[in-house]
């Protein structure tokens, strides 16, 4: 125990200094700079853009990770424009543009894409769960499924994307929101019963923490719900179903059975909270009976948004690879909230506004960004 790993490091993570120093870059960027320097071309002016390329025109995604990109490029010789973080975009929308001498930022491409691709994936996963759940609360439970060093990023992106709460206290403190959580099976197993675990939790934890009691460690869900409610009848808020997949059958039917028993025994105020491998399809199925969700891997391990960062102009001349829509562009938001991509010199339709704006300054409060996402999802323009 306590031994250091390769090169004296204890954890397999890059430091902030290594990221800023482009030590995390793919090796071909370092070699590219060697070649360009040999030809005296390292400071060639270029214009580059980040987009998602896909033939699925109905695809959409929530842009996240711009805060870290802004920090990385703050002292780099490059002009940066970006859509506001929390913007819901479509394929081929340029979400970030870079203009300047290629060598100033070439070796940061790996980090730029890494910041954006994963954070946007998490935020989009959260937004999809948000849409599925409607007005019912969704809490991010997935930090334990990913490397702990990126927990704050995961929780920030999940909250930005529409989650109502996050589970990790470090991240919640940074977001200036309370951490959300119930109690684990470990507590019930150590204490020995659902009833005593509920009472112990109620006695020890501050009153402002909702009493959401896990009911399926030892007991059938119907009886576990009643045991928990009777143990702390005056303070119980909800019962949490975390039933293993091999014992669920129809998960909604289990909840309906428990709901019936709670209601007829005077506990109609007790809510039902679902967790354990919950995803969009589960939420859609459970929503008629379930009141709230704890979502793990569907958010924390959501597919990343597969952005690319491509040159579209060299030395003021349009130049782009095959499959890429060349030239500088404007990304416009129309009066109905939809987006339109046009060449940089094109005239904008009446009432349209430019979404690409200089990146920098103090990042917006994440609650403000979350509100931006929710207002866009509420338009009905983005489906599951």
Image (cartoon, helix red, strand yellow):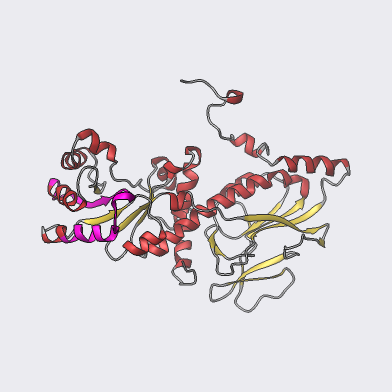
Is residue 274 toward the left or the right of residue 368 in the image? left
Q: What range is drawn magenta here?
A: 231-260
Residue 288 in view here:
yes
Q: Is residue 326 above or below residue 33?
A: below
In magenta segment, residue 351: no
Outermost residue, right direction? 39
Q: Is residue 311 above or below residue 334?
A: above
Outermost residue, left direction? 265
Q: Residue at x 77, y 49 (%)?
A: 102
Q: Residue at x 64, y 48 (%)?
A: 112
Q: Residue at x 61, y 52 (%)?
A: 360
In magenta segment, residue 257: yes
Quadrant of res 60: bottom right
Residue 362 in view here:
no
Image coords of residue 71 (percent x, y): 60, 45
Frontmost residue, 376 versus 32: 32
How many callouts does the rendering have?
0
């Amino acid at each position: 125990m306590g031994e250091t790993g390769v090169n004296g490091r204890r954890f397999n993570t890059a430091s902030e200094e290594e990221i800023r120093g482009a030590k995390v870059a793919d090796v071909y960027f370092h070699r590219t700079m060697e070649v360009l320097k040999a030809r005296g071309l390292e400071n060639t002016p270029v214009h580059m853009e980040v987009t998602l390329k896909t033939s699925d025109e109905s695809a959409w995604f929530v842009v996240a990770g711009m805060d870290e990109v802004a920090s990385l490029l703050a002292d780099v010789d490059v002009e940066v424009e970006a859509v506001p973080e929390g913007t819901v975009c479509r394929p081929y929308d340029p979400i970030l543009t870079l203009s300047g001498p290629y060598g100033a930022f070439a070796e940061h491409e790996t980090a730029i894409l890494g910041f954006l691709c994963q954070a946007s994936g998490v935020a989009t996963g959260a937004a999809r769960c948000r849409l599925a759940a409607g007005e019912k609360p969704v809490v991010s439970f997935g930090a334990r499924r990913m490397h702990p060093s990126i927990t704050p990023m995961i929780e920030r992106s999940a909250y930005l994307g529409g989650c109502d709460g996050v589970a990790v206290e470090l991240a919640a403190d940074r977001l200036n929101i309370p951490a959300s959580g119930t109690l684990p099976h470990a507590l019930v197993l150590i204490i020995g019963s659902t009833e005593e675990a509920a009472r112990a939790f109620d006695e020890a934890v501050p009153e402002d923490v909702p009493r959401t009691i896990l009911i399926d460690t030892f007991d059938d869900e119907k009886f576990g719900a009643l045991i928990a409610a009777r143990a702390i009848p005056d303070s119980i808020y909800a019962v949490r179903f975390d039933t293993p997949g091999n014992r669920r059958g129809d998960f909604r039917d289990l909840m309906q059975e428990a709901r019936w028993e709670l209601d007829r025994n005077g506990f109609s105020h007790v809510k039902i909270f679902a967790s354990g491998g919950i995803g969009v399809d589960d939420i859609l199925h459970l929503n008629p009976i379930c009141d709230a969700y704890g979502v793990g891997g569907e958010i924390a391990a959501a597919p990343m948004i597969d952005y690319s960062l491509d040159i579209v102009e060299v030395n003021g001349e349009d130049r782009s690879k095959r499959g890429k829509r060349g030239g500088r562009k404007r990304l416009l938001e129309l009066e109905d909230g939809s987006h339109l991509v046009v060449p940089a010199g094109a005239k904008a339709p009446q009432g349209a506004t430019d979404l690409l704006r200089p990146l920098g300054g103090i990042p917006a409060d994440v609650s403000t960004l979350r509100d931006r996402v929710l207002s866009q999802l509420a338009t009905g323009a983005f489906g599951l």
